[in-house]
C-alpha cells in the first residue's frame, strides 16, 4: 500500500497536477510544470544517492544522513544488515580465538601448512620442538626448516595412515617425535607431532629388564638342570655326588628366591602410590639392622653404631627398614674380614642423616652414577658370591624417592665407601621438631 502511495506521489500526482495546469491555462505551461516537478524530484534523489554513497564509503554505526522518508527505510534496512554482520563477525572471531587458544594449549605440536607445504600457523609446542618462530617462519616451506631426508620423502606424499619418527636435537638429550600429516580444509595439511622420548625410553628399559631377569634366572636354572641330568646318569649309591649336588641346587634355588623376593619388593614400591606415615624410631631400627648385619658378618667385622636416639621421622617403616638393611648388608658383603663398619643416625644442618661407612673394596668414580640401576654391578662375581641380586640399591633409590630423601655415595677404591641418606627436615616427626 505504502509502495502505491509512493508511486502516486512520485509519478501520477505530478502528471495530474500538470494536466490540470494544461486544462486551466495551456499545454505548454502544463508541460513546464511537469518538467520542473520531475527535475526537483530527480535532484532530490540524486542528493540522496550521493549521501548514500558517502555513507557507504565510511559507514558509522548509529549515524545516518538526513534523507527523505523513503531513503530512511533503505538506511534502516542496511543498518540492520550491518548490525547482523557485525554480530556474526564478532562470534566468528571469538570462535577463532577459542580455537587458537585450544590449539596452543594442546600437549602436542600442531603446524598448519598450505598445499605448497608453507607454514600458515603453528602452536607453541611446535615452535619448541622444531625450533620455529611463527612470526619469522610464516610462509616458509616446512621442509626447508626440517632438513631430514626421511621428512622430505614423508612430505612429498603425505598419508594420514603413516607416522614418521624423527630425532630432533635439543639441549641435553635429543627428542624423539612421531609425526603425522592430516589433510585439512582446502588442500591444507595439519602436521601433528607427539613427543615419544619417554615412551621409547620406557620401552628400552622394559626390554633391558626382561633380558636381565631372563639372564639372572637362567644361570641358577642351568646349574639345577645340570645336576638333575647328572643324577639320572650317576648310580644312586654315590651319596657324595648326591650330597654335593643337593647343596649346590639349594644354593641356586635360594638365589632364585632372593631374586624373586627383591623383584616383588621393587614391584610393590613401583605400584603403590600411598606412602604410610608411621613415626619411625630410626635409632631402634638401626640397632635391628646392625644385629642382622652381625649375623651376616659372622663376627668377621666390627660394627659401630652412633645414633641420636630422640630423632624420629615420618614414613613407611618396612620400606625404610629395607633401605637401611640393604646399605648395611652391602657394607658387610663388600668389606674384607676385620673391616670396621660405622653406622650413624644424626641431625646435620637440620636434616636427619643415616650413614653407613665401611672400609671395604670401594667403588671407582665412573660407576657411582649407575649404581642404583637395576642389575648394575661393579663386580658381578663378588656380588653373586655374597648372595647379591643386583637390586638392593635400586630398592633403596625407590624407597628414598617415595620419602623425598636422597642418597649420597662417596667412595675410594680400596679404602671404603660411605652411603648416606639425607631425609628432608619436613619428615622429622612433629613431637621431635619441638625437641630439636
Ligand atoms: P648387589 O646385590 O650386587 O650388591 P646392589 O644394588 O646392592 O646389588 O649394589 C650394586 C653394586 O654396587 C654392587 O654389585 C657393588 O658392585 C656396588 N656396591 C654396593 N654397595 C657397596 C659397598 N658398600 N662397597 C662396595 N661396592 C658396593
Image: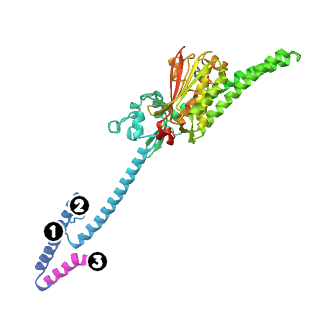
Q: Which residues are magenta?
A: 1-22
Other-residue count near label 3 (Cα within 10 Å), few / some / many at <14 / 14–19 / ≥20: few
Q: Is residue 218 left or right of residue 24?
A: right
Pick whichever, 52 or 351, lies toward us. Answer: 351
Foreground mark, 3 or 1, reads: 3
Q: Is tag 2's residue or tag 3's residue first in the polypeptide sequence?
A: 3
Residue 5, magenta (yes or no): yes
Q: Cβ–Cβ below 8 Å for labels 2 and 3? A: no
Measured Cα–Cα span from mark 1 to mark 2:
25 Å
The residue carrying mark 3 is 2
On the image, which quarter does residue 323 sit in?
top right
Residue 304: x percent and y percent? Answer: 57, 23
Q: Residue at x 23, y 69 (%)?
A: 71
The answer to whether the beta carbon of the residue marked 3 is less than 8 Å from any atom of ligand 1 is no
Residue 60 is labelled as: 2
Q: Is residue 215 left or right of residue 276?
A: right
Residue 43 is labelled as: 1
On the image, which quarter does residue 217 sit in?
top right
Other-residue count near label 1 (Cα within 10 Å), few / some / many at <14 / 14–19 / ≥20: few
Q: Residue at x 50, y 39 (%)?
A: 432
Residue 172: x percent and y percent? Answer: 44, 27
Q: Residue at x 40, y 35 (%)?
A: 128
Amino acid at each position: 500500500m505504502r509502495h502505491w502511495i509512493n508511486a502516486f506521489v512520485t509519478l501520477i500526482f505530478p502528471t495530474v497536477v500538470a494536466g490540470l495546469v494544461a486544462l486551466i491555462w495551456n499545454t505548454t505551461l502544463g508541460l513546464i510544470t511537469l518538467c520542473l516537478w520531475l527535475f526537483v524530484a530527480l535532484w532530490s534523489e540524486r542528493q540522496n544517492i550521493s549521501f548514500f554513497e558517502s555513507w557507504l564509503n565510511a559507514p558509522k554505526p548509529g549515524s545516518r544522513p538526513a534523507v527523505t522518508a523513503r531513503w530512511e527505510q533503505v538506511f534502516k534496512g542496511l543498518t540492520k544488515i550491518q548490525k547482523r554482520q557485525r554480530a556474526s563477525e564478532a562470534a566468528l572471531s571469538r570462535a577463532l580465538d577459542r580455537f587458537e587458544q585450544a590449539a596452543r594449549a594442546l600437549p602436542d605440536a600442531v603446524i598448519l601448512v598450505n598445499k605448497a607445504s608453507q607454514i600458515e600457523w603453528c602452536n607453541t609446542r611446535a615452535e619448541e620442538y622444531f625450533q620455529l618462530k611463527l612470526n619469522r617462519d610464516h610462509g616458509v616451506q616446512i621442509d626447508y626448516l626440517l632438513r631430514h631426508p626421511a621428512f622430505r620423502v614423508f612430505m612429498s606424499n603425505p598419508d594420514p595412515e603413516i607416522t614418521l619418527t624423527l630425532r630432533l636435537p635439543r639441549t641435553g638429550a635429543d627428542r624423539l617425535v612421531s609425526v603425522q600429516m592430516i589433510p585439512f580444509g582446502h588442500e591444507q595439511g595439519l602436521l601433528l607431532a607427539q613427543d615419544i622420548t619417554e615412551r621409547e625410553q620406557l620401552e628400552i628399559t622394559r626390554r633391558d629388564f626382561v633380558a636381565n631377569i631372563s639372564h639372572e634366572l637362567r644361570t641358577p636354572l642351568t646349574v639345577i638342570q645340570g645336576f638333575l641330568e647328572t643324577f639320572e646318569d650317576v648310580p644312586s649309591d654315590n651319596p657324595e655326588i648326591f650330597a654335593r649336588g643337593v647343596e649346590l641346587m639349594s644354593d641356586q634355588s635360594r638365589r632364585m628366591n632372593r631374586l624373586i623376593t627383591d623383584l616383588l619388593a621393587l614391584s610393590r614400591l613401583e605400584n603403590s602410590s600411598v606412602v604410610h606415615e608411621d613415626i619411625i624410631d630410626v635409632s631402634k631400627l638401626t640397632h635391628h639392622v646392625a644385629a642382622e648385619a652381625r649375623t651376616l658378618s659372622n663376627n668377621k667385622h666390627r660394627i659401630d653404631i652412633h645414633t641420636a636416639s630422640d630423632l624420629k621421622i615420618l614414613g613407611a617403616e618396612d620400606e625404610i627398614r629395607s633401605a637401611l638393611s640393604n646399605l648395611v648388608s652391602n657394607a658387610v658383603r663388600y668389606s674384607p674380614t676385620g673391616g670396621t663398619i660405622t653406622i650413624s643416625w644424626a641431625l646435620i644442618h637440620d636434616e636427619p642423616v643415616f650413614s653407613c661407612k665401611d672400609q671395604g673394596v670401594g667403588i671407582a668414580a665412573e660407576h657411582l652414577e649407575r649404581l642404583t640401576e637395576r642389575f648394575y654391578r661393579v663386580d658381578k662375581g663378588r656380588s653373586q658370591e655374597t648372595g647379591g641380586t643386583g637390586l638392593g640399591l635400586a630398592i633403596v633409590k625407590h624407597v628414598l624417592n617415595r620419602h623425598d630423601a636422597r642418597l649420597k655415595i662417596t667412595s675410594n677404591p680400596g679404602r671404603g665407601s660411605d652411603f648416606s641418606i639425607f631425609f628432608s627436615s619436613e619428615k622429622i616427626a612433629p613431637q621431635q621438631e619441638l625437641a630439636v
